[in-house]
Amino acid sequence: MANTRAPDTYVKLVLMSSSGQEIAHSKTSVRRGQPNPLFKETFMFQVALFQLPDVTLMASVYTKRSMKRKDMIGWFALGLNSSGEDELAHWNQMRDSKGEQVCRWHVLLES
């Protein structure tokens, strides 16, 4: 009998400089066996207002198959190297929100 259980998933966030260097990173807790997981978690990265035009926030979704094996499902990026127009609009809305929460859905790009 085949295993039909949904995979365990999590999201990794990486804040990068304009040169591609990692500034900070974080990840969500693992959602175990959920076919359509929601990641309602808040993350704070310390970035000076003048640095916002020069950073990229990369979000990658992974399945966790075992203790050591993980596979990327997809990704999107916000900020300097946004992966699309919607992502750039989201970044600009966050930048202009004056600390208020901004929530949007994004389509994952293939890894």
Image (spheres, rainbow, N blue to C red):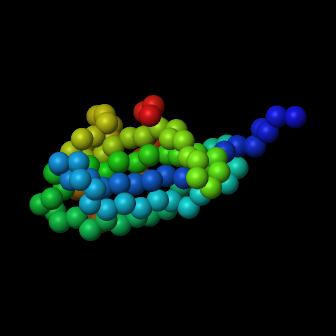
Instruction: Name the side, left or right, on which 61 lies relative to 30.
Output: left
Measured as percent of width and height from the top left, residue 45 is found at 31, 65
**Please, which residue is most extreme toward the left here?**
50
Measured as percent of width and height from the top left, residue 54 is found at 16, 51
Whether residue 91 appears in this view of the structure is no
Q: Residue at x 29, y 34 (%)?
A: 85
Measured as percent of width and height from the top left, residue 109 is found at 43, 33
Whether residue 4 appears in this view of the structure is yes
Q: How many marks?
A: 0
Q: Residue at x 40, y 48 (%)?
A: 59
**Quarter containing the C terminus:** top left
Instruction: Name the side, left or right, on which 72 lies relative to 93.
Output: right
**Quarter containing the N terminus:** top right
**Of the pair 70 and 82, the residue shown nearer to us:** 70
Reply above or below: 85 against 78.
above
**Please, which residue is most extreme toward the top here?**
110
**Of the pair 37 and 65, the residue shown nearer to us:** 65
Measured as percent of width and height from the top left, residue 18 is found at 17, 49
Q: Quadrant of residue 7?
A: top right
Q: Residue at x 64, y 47 (%)?
A: 65
**Please, which residue is most extreme toward the right here?**
1
